[in-house]
Amino acid sequence: MDSKCKFSLHGRNVIITGASGGLGREITLRLLNKYGCRVLGVGRNEEKLRRLSDELGGLSDRFEYQVFDVSDPEGWRQLAEYVIKGGFEADVLINDAGILPPFARFGKYTCEEIDSAIRVNLYSVVYSLYEFVPIFSKKPNTAIINISSLDALCPLAGTSLYSACKAGVRVLSEAMREEYRGKIYIPAVCPGFIRTGIMKNQRRAVSPLVNFVSMPAEKAAKLILRRLNWGWSRIVIGADAHFMSTAYRIAPVISLRFFNRIFKASKMELFRDIYE
Ligand SMILES: NC(=O)c1ccc[n+]([C@@H]2O[C@H](COP(=O)([O-])OP(=O)(O)OC[C@H]3O[C@@H](n4cnc5c(N)ncnc54)[C@H](OP(=O)(O)O)[C@@H]3O)[C@@H](O)[C@H]2O)c1
């Protein structure tokens, strides 16, 4: 059972990474439209962030953006400095930006893929915590929300690298939640498959079936924000995430073997680098 604490997203000043696309974009739109927040979006693609700002119309006066790669500690240092100097009175940070390396056996990853997966998925969160915990500790009712994954609760074959990073994000959040209880709300969000652009780094074709079983990003954003607003500490989103994480908790070895067999039996092109 998740523990509950008092937290509200309404009218907050939110920094969100990965605002230029996918889940981060949907969360940004919802925070602006439904929660009356001011949002500072972070992304590495200025063109996409500018387009988002243009699309916001009348809401754009509550939206600004900064362009940097979240795996660069200097980008975080400069953002923290901007906040300290009063450029944006942030009280909530959402670490959403992330990448999914190709589905593959560990031995098939290149050094570049390993490096970038760890830097973008794990180090970025560590850098953000290093810069923002001291700032948020001094303010009341702050939050650092980390988007982890189903893979942090049920590490699937073919996702070793991604699972390790996302498990790192989850346990970091859970340990720090206790360290900063009463000061900073630090939940971990573990969604199952969501229909976004996350498959763009795959080497193999993505079957339409994957999109079919994935939750629309708009719905995922709605569910995540609602649960955050209830103050939940670990937020699991999607029937797939609930089912697979429960199976893994009950029978860690058998469940992984079972899911692996399903992947293999599907004969999907996407999973070829796991089995060949
Ligand atoms: N989709 C899923 O099934 C799923 C499931 C569980 C968890 N998640 C997690 O949810 C989060 C959002 O993923 P998504 O599905 O929305 O993926 P997405 O559609 O690929 O969007 C990711 C966003 O993060 C940005 N980003 C990536 N690397 C970055 C970097 N180094 N610096 C700054 N921005 C960067 C991307 O910008 P560009 O457009 O420039 O690439 C994009 O805006 C990730 O943490 C992911 O691991 C996703």
Image: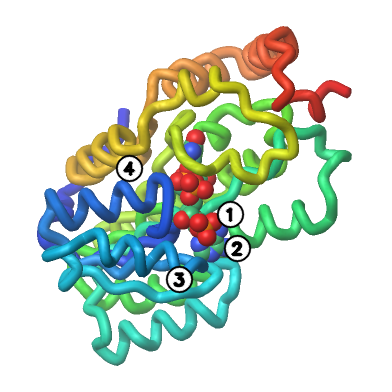
Q: Secondary structure at mark 1?
A: helix
Residue under label 2, please give it: 123
Residue type at mark 3: give it. Answer: Glu
Judged from this view, the residue extending furthest toward the bottom is: 85
Q: Is mark 3 within 8 Å of ligand 1?
A: no
Q: Secondary structure at mark 2?
A: helix
Front-most of residues 157 and 267: 267
4 or 3: tag closer to the N-terminus: 3
Residue type at mark 4: give it. Answer: Ser
4 or 2: tag closer to the N-terminus: 2
Q: Are marks 4 and 2 in contact (CB under 8 Å)?
A: no
- Is any part of residue 185 visible from this angle? yes
Residue 46: numbered disc: 3
User: Label 2 vs label 1: CA separation?
Assistant: 6 Å
Residue type at mark 2: give it. Answer: Tyr
Residue 8 coordinates in the image, percent (x, y): 14, 52
> Colour scheme in the image?
rainbow
Residue under label 4, please give it: 233
Specify whether 133 is left or right of 244: left
Front-most of residues 61 and 36: 61
